[in-house]
Structure formats: C-alpha cells, structure tokens
Image (cartoon, rainbow, N blue to C red):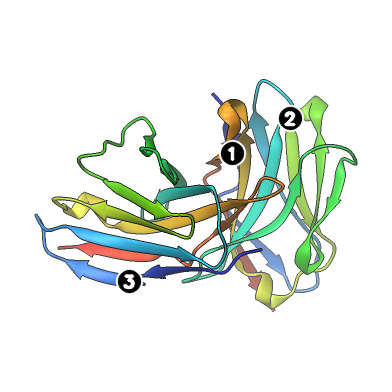
Amino acid sequence: SAVISQKPSRDICQRGTSLTIQCQVDSQVTMMFWYRQQPGQSLTLIATANQGSEATYESGFVIDKFPISRPNLTFSTLTVSNMSPEDSSIYLCSVELAGGLQFFGPGTRLTVL
Amino acid sequence: AQSVTQPDIHITVSEGASLELRCNYSYGATPYLFWYVQSPGQGLQLLLKYFSGDTLVQGIKGFEAEFKRSQSSFNLRKPSVHWSDAAEYFCAVGDSAGGNEKLTFGTGTRLTIIP
C-alpha cells in the first residue's frame, strides 16, 4: 500500500476564488489520479496525471477549470479555479501501485459559498 | 464505455446477520473489479479486487466477493456483520485500455447496522 496525504483536509471558499489541493505520497508512483465526489454522489474521475507529461482530462473537465501539476513522482496538485457553489465536493487523489491497485488519499472537502 | 450499477442505495442489516451487496458491471473484455469502503469522513479503502483466476476472492475485514461472468456481477458478501461495518460501499471497474487503470465507480450502497 501507500501513505497518501492531502492538504488542506477541508476549506470554505468564496465564489470566484481558486483553491489548490496538494497530494503527497510516500513512494514514487507513475500514475496519479484526481477524482471528484459531489455531495451524496459517487466518484468521478477528473484527470490522470503522469509525471513529465500533460494531464489527461475526462469528458466534462477542462484544464482551465482544473489545472493540474505533477512536478515529480511523489507529488501533485489540483487547482479548482473560479469556484462556484457547484464545485462544492470532496476531491480525492489516488495513486496506482504495482499490480494495478489504486489507493486513495483522505480527500479534501471543499465548500464554496 | 464501462459502467457499474449498484441497485441498492441503502441497506439495513442487524448486527451479526449476513450481508450481500450487489454490483453489476458492463465491460467489453475481462474486467478488473474492485470493492472500496468509505467510512464517514474518511477516504476510500480497498476491500478486495478481482483481476483473473479464482472467481471467489477474499478481502480484508472478513469480506469476500464472487465474480460471475454469466451474470456480469461481482457481489460483496460477509457472513456476519459488525457495527463497525456501517459505511458506504463502492464497486468499481477498471479500464486497462491505453495502459492505465481508470476506475469507474458505481453510485454506492450505504450500509446501516442495527443492534
């Protein structure tokens, strides 16, 4: 398994501002993923982040709204830009380890007023 | 595209009783299947996985799941639930096309345990 941490664990933000969420893992991993879990809903994949290349976004998600950085093999950030109340969700990062298993961070609970 | 259906939104079970959570998937090839559990305010924890081989897989916390290709199902079971099993359970299918594992999740089943 892997130890994955996210910062912040929760935040309350004003409409129109941006928030950057950090994801740190205790080992080097190639694949990192960012998911969104809207209130009472399941998880939806936002993008796949590989070190050294541009993130790959899923349908319905765009780089201008959710820019992602992946500067090294243990760290990634997701920014939620120009936030609106509809962006209120839990944002989770995950990593894929050998054997194709994904492990998830504890999540960042975002509330947009 | 793959999809996952969890028909039961909410299940209530007495402590000590058996449990079965249903999961049906749609995928063009042999699927990679997973069950995750999310306790209140927590992240997701992997319970078990199926990649290939034995269709009955054992996981952590006494859970098991059986892959039935003919029924496109991967139901989660536990013979005797404990109050600490109260949580949200998610079934997921992995898409290995393109060389990475993009997970598609079901909508989840909330499990309530009553004394």
Instruction: Name the one closer to the observer, A31 or B81.
Output: A31
Report the chain holding disc 2: B
Pointer 1 local density, CA inside 10 Å: few below 14, some 14–19, many at least 20:
some
Pointer 2 local density, CA inside 10 Å: few below 14, some 14–19, many at least 20:
some
Question: Could you give the CA–CA distance between mark 3 and mark 2, rounded to whole angstroms?
Answer: 39 Å
- Same subunit: marks 1 and 2: yes
Residue A27 visible, this angle = yes
Does residue A14 appear left or right of residue A44 in this picture? Answer: left
- Same subunit: marks 3 and 1: no
Image quarter for residue A54? top left
Reading the image, the residue beneath label 3 is A8
Q: Picture coordinates of residue A26 (x, y %)?
A: 54, 68
> Which amino acid, by three-letter code, is at mark 3?
Pro
User: Residue B101: which disc?
Assistant: 1
Reading the image, the residue beneath label 2 is B72
Q: Picture coordinates of residue A73 (x, y %)?
A: 48, 55
Report helix, strand or loop for mark 2. Answer: loop
